[in-house]
Amino acid sequence: MAPPRKNTEKTPAFRVVEVLVVPLLTAIVKVEQRGTEHLPTSGPFVLTPNHYSNFDPVVVAWGLWKLGRAPRFLAKASLFTVPLVGWGLRAIGQIPVERSGPGRQSAPISAATELLEHEKGIIIYPEGTLTRDPDLWPMRGKTGAVRLALQHGIPVIPSAHWGVQAILPRYSKKLRLFPRKTVRIVYGAPVDLDDLREGDLDQRKLSEATTRVMAAITGLVEELRGETAPAERWNPAAHNQSEYGHLDEPKQKKSAE
């Protein structure tokens, strides 16, 4: 019988980041987490949070770290070209993803597969970018997260958070560090995709799986906000909006603030 595999998620590089970053985070953010029993304590998983602030990956990562799992993201490839930042991202196992070009589809999935085969988790924002919804509700999703999960039999754990906009509003560059803010994070039960795992993986299955994941995330956001989301999720294409980058519509800028 083979000896149990040693948990190597929290590498020395991660420990260095912990020493440097956690004291600051503790001073500016109070994280309250619920539904933590749904997050696997070991083995691979795909965590799918909502996304409405450039600061929320930091809080999502910290929440995961507090639960004993090392956070890994599919990060914009351009970040890896920044001196020191790129080196640091690689040292803690973050995965570069191209938003265009021939490697856009295969590279991130290949890298993520390697992590999952080593029983580590990965965080993928199914929206792909900050939500375009003017009221910060989750918008329509993309298929990358469910494709990875369905191809490898990995559970998808939906997650939602609320409160990060008080620290860094959408598209803002001004951090509001004090007074200390509270951010609430909730984890949902794994999304049921079992009926979609058999047979060939086609666009219909990917679309259906993505719809289920986005519905689960939206339900968690509703729970945190105590409100009901719009019946139809925001679709940037229907509003003549670009997929990525800063939006300049006055209504959206106002709601983000």
Image (spheres, grey):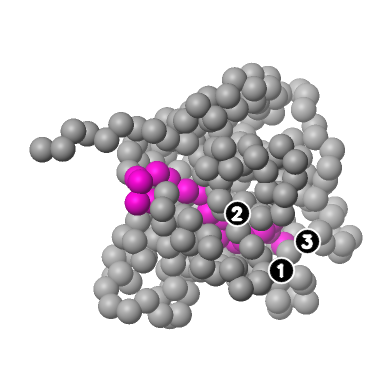
| Magenta residues, start to end | 116-132
In the rendered image, which quarter contains the N terminus? Answer: top left
Q: Earlier in the sequence, mark 2 or mark 3?
A: 2
Going 55% across and 37% down the picture, which residue do you hit? 92
Q: Secondary structure at mark 3?
A: loop
Residue 239 can be seen in this image: yes
Going 35% across and 56% down the picture, which residue do you hit? 154
Mark 3 lies on residue: 245
Q: Secondary structure at mark 2?
A: strand
Measuring from the top left, give residue 187's x and y in whole percent.
Answer: 45, 44
Q: Which mark is residue 243?
A: 1
Number of disc labels: 3
> Which amino acid, mark 3?
Gly
Quote the CA–CA distance across marks 2 and 1: 18 Å
Q: Secondary structure at mark 1?
A: loop
Q: Residues within 10 Å of mark 1 (few under 14, many from 20)?
A: some
Q: Earlier in the sequence, mark 2 or mark 1?
A: 2
Measuring from the top left, give residue 53's x and y in whole percent.
Answer: 71, 47
Residue 33 can be seen in this image: no
Q: Nearer the viewer, residue 115 or 186?
A: 115
